[in-house]
Image (cartoon, helix red, strand yellow):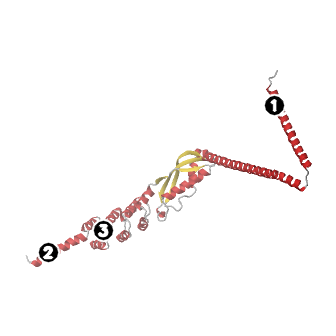
Amino acid sequence: MEPTILIAIFVILLFLILFFNFVPFGLWISALAANVKIGIFNLAGMRLRRVTPSKIVIPLIKATKAGVLVPINKLEAHYLAGGNVDNVVNSLIAAQRANIPLEFERAAAIDLAGRNVLEAVQMSVNPRVIETPIIAAIAKDGIELRAKAKVTVRANIDRLVGGAGEQTIIARVGEGVVTTIGSSETHKDVLENPDAISRMVLSKGLETGTAFEILSIDIADVDVGRNVGAQLQTDQAEADKRIAQAKAEERRAMAVAREQEMKASVQEMRAKVVEAEAEVPLALASALRDGKLGVMDYYNMQNILADTKMRTAISDSGADAQGNSGINQNDRPGR
């Protein structure tokens, strides 16, 4: 065999190997078998555009078999935008089976917004029950109630883009339960008629601005908690007692300080008296020296002082004797 022929055969084999590796020939055969009109060069163009052909062709085959007409260019554009093509196609098929009007553009927008469009369609058909955590609220009589609610919601496809999620629903329902219990006169009213909470919460229009439609709110459980009113009164009484004790201690400390001040003042006055008495002999000496006081006058003054001391001693001894006699009479046994 001539070398030219060998080279030609080698080139042809190399071309076929590269062609079948670059062009998904098996995927093209599957599309033709499913009556999906797609050219082999279109599949090669997907390779050049860095699009995985299987991510486009398999959902397209699925949509064609389900009777959903979706242009291949839109699928490819959605894939390049970072969307989940298979999930969008599944949601379109589910919406068609459930007679829910859903276009490809809206489904793609919901998917690009980060929401699970297939789950939204399924929730539109089969509503979901959202269970709230335990909600604690206090009635006007000070009794705490713990309630748990179950919220049945259905997805609203028209509000999925830009609508709030489940956490907003839970927060709004919790706020409504707290407001309803807090406005009740007694906790017994809530226990006797728990469906009043559901009616009050539903009347507030909690689904506004959310991606869901609230079908019902059911109070699953209501338990009685603490007596918060009595506890607050006890704490207030304890605080008042401590304040009164602090004020009494302050007054006692002020009285003790005042007493100490008075004792110091008495000692100061005594010191002044002693100081004044010490000046008396000096004054007498000065008066005798200056001739203002005679010797006889001095002796008369001494006699008067001695007489005064004697009378004072006699009166003190008489008072003591009377006190002792009174005690002796009281100690005698009665006849």
First of labels 2, 1 by sequence position:
2
Give coordinates of residue 155: x percent, y percent.
Answer: 47, 59
Image quadrant where residue 17 sits: bottom left
Nearer to the camera, 235 or 86: 235
First of labels 3, 2 by sequence position:
2
Q: What element carries label 2?
A: helix
Amino acid at the residue labelled 3: Pro
Amino acid at the residue labelled 2: Ile
* Residue at the (89%, 43%) spot, across then down: 303
Amino acid at the residue labelled 1: Asn
Image quadrant where residue 18 sits: bottom left
Nearer to the camera, 126 or 193: 193
Estimate how packed mark 1 is, as few (under 14), some (14 to 19) or many (20 or more) residues with alpha carbons within 10 Å. Answer: few
Which disc, if any, is residue 175?
Answer: none
Give coordinates of residue 193: x percent, y percent.
Answer: 58, 46
Is 228 positioned to the left or the right of 104 in the image?
Answer: right
Which disc, if any, is residue 9?
Answer: 2
Which disc, if any, is residue 53?
Answer: 3
How far apart are labels 2 and 1 at the CA level? 154 Å
How far apart are labels 3 and 2 at the CA level? 30 Å
Is 325 positioned to the left or the right of 51 in the image?
Answer: right
Say if 56 sits above or below 138 in the image.
below
Q: Name the residue under label 1.
A: 324
Estimate how packed mark 2 is, as few (under 14), some (14 to 19) or many (20 or more) residues with alpha carbons within 10 Å. Answer: few
Q: Nearer the viewer, mark 2 or mark 1?
A: 1
Q: Which of marks 3 and 1 is in front?
A: 1
Say if 188 sits above or below 56 in the image.
above
How far apart are labels 3 and 1 at the CA level? 130 Å
First of labels 3, 1 by sequence position:
3
Q: What element carries label 3?
A: helix
Q: Quadrant of the C terminus?
A: top right
* Residue at the (59%, 53%) spot, across then down: 179
